[in-house]
Amino acid sequence: MTNSLAFARHGDKENSAFFEEYLEQILQERDRLGLTDLIHEIDALMITVDPDHSVEYIAELCLMTPYHYLVSLESESHWTHILRIDLDSPDLIVREVKDPNVRGIFRSLNEIYPVGSQKPNSRYMGEVIRVSNKQAVEEIQRAREFRFFNQHDIRNLELPANLAISKPSPYTHNIVGYLERKVTDLRVYALGISSIRSDIQSAYEKAKETQEKLGIDDLILPIDHLATRVYSQNREVAILEYLSLSSYHFWGAYNIKDQNSSTNVTKSVHPIPESKSPAKVFTANNTPYFVNHLEKLPSPTETFVRNYGPRLHHMALAVKDGERDGVENIDFVVNSIAEQGKGFLLDVIGSKEQGLKQIFSNASEHSSLIIEYVQRFGDFNGFFTKENVAALTEAAGVEEGVQTQDF
Ligand SMILES: [Fe+2]
């Protein structure tokens, strides 16, 4: 039996007695019930975009990431496109609403937020996690008071019928889907009619030709981590809830004092690399927005959440360690992509001496998600450096949707 508490803790962010007590209880119970061993890696990430945005978004993803276009699934009111690297890293499921007038639960999650509502169907939805027994996992989770969509809901939502899907989290607004699959089986999504769409196929081929021409096609690696932003008061509960739904452990948390924020990292307990199951990071302000004027504190994280709603903020892709044409790979990748007209929120930060270099792209106009590139050097065994996180957090605070405070 896996022991989810047998991992070293990192970081300097202090947690409440409540958090420490329930972290232990939740992980012990998860192990004892067998859930930790029934729940495996992240198998897919689900993203939704507004009508007519998926072709361009897929072109953007195929240029900026190692993903390939695989197939499209058509159902009555949605297109669902599957992007894949291989079976050793999660798929991307990009779902497009066909009719701008379609209303649904995921749209509602955007609508009460001033910036989120401007692109009502654009948001990260959540992860699909591979399990050995979907029915057993759903039953155990229901007994722990997690709520799931029923089969009728899943059909109406036009989500794959072979998934068990949780209701959106009150803290992150993300869902978790469980997909039963043996590691040797293919990944299959039971939804609609499948076809290769010629417009997407040609946008995909063009993006891959560009990647190859730029010489970056072998430098961008799978997703390293996913970073979710939540309200300050939801930091601990969002982490504990995710640990309850997954087989992740609490790696540790760092206080990013200058940005009045903390970075909280969870990783799989299973002995698999991040490229197979990305780390899940939670970021939250240290103090709620209404004390900022008293304490004179910056607040980029909470301002983001107030404008967009709690949600995934960025997907970080690893960049292969090494140099190309005399510059470090991350600089080579960023310069090449910038030449194609893609913007970045800051310059590449960090150094080989510090162990890693990182950068944030502009938020995608299609999904609102930022892409982070991260290159780790040699045997750097930290996950990040505080200096880099402070600079990235500050840069994310000048992103257009965060700057807009006039609501
Ligand atoms: Fe990050």
Image (spheres, helix red, strand yellow):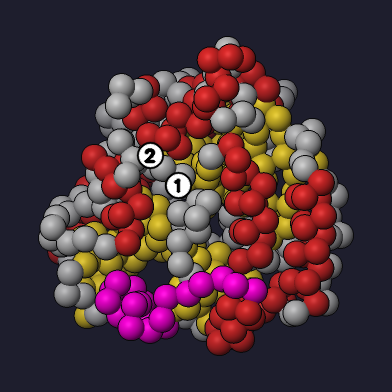
* Residue 99 inside the magenta-drawn segment: no
Q: Label 2 neighbourhood size at 10 Å, few (<14), some (14-19), many (20+)?
A: many
Part of the protein shown in magenta: 144-162
* Residue 384: % across, % down: 67, 35
Q: Is residue 338 above or below residue 277?
A: above
Q: What residue is shown at x 45% (from left), y 61% (from top)?
A: 168
Q: Nearer the viewer, residue 382 or 48?
A: 48
Q: Nearer the viewer, residue 33 or 183?
A: 33
Q: What residue is shown at x 32% (from left), y 61% (from top)?
A: 105
Q: Is residue 114 above or below residue 21?
A: above
- The three-letter code of the residue at mark 2 reads Tyr
- The three-letter code of the residue at mark 1 reads Arg
Residue 388 lies left or right of residue 398; in this view the side is right
Quarter of the figure that contains the N terminus: bottom right
Is label 2 in a helix, a strand or a loop? helix
The residue to which callout 1 is attached is: 311
Q: Nearer the viewer, residue 281 or 222?
A: 281
Q: Label 1 neighbourhood size at 10 Å, few (<14), some (14-19), many (20+)?
A: many
Q: Are marks 1 and 2 in contact (CB under 8 Å)?
A: yes
Q: Is residue 108 above or below residue 26?
A: above
* Residue labelled 2 has its Cβ within 8 Å of some atom of ligand 1: no
Is label 1 in a helix, a strand or a loop? strand
* Residue 146 inside the magenta-drawn segment: yes
Q: What residue is shown at x 78% (from left), y 36% (from top)?
A: 14
Q: Is residue 321 above or below residue 108?
A: above
For residue 308, the mark is 2
Residue 255 lies left or right of residue 388; in this view the side is right
* Residue 283: % across, % down: 58, 39
Residue 79 occupies quadrant: bottom left
* Residue 13: % across, % down: 75, 34
* Residue labelled 1 has its Cβ within 8 Å of some atom of ligand 1: no
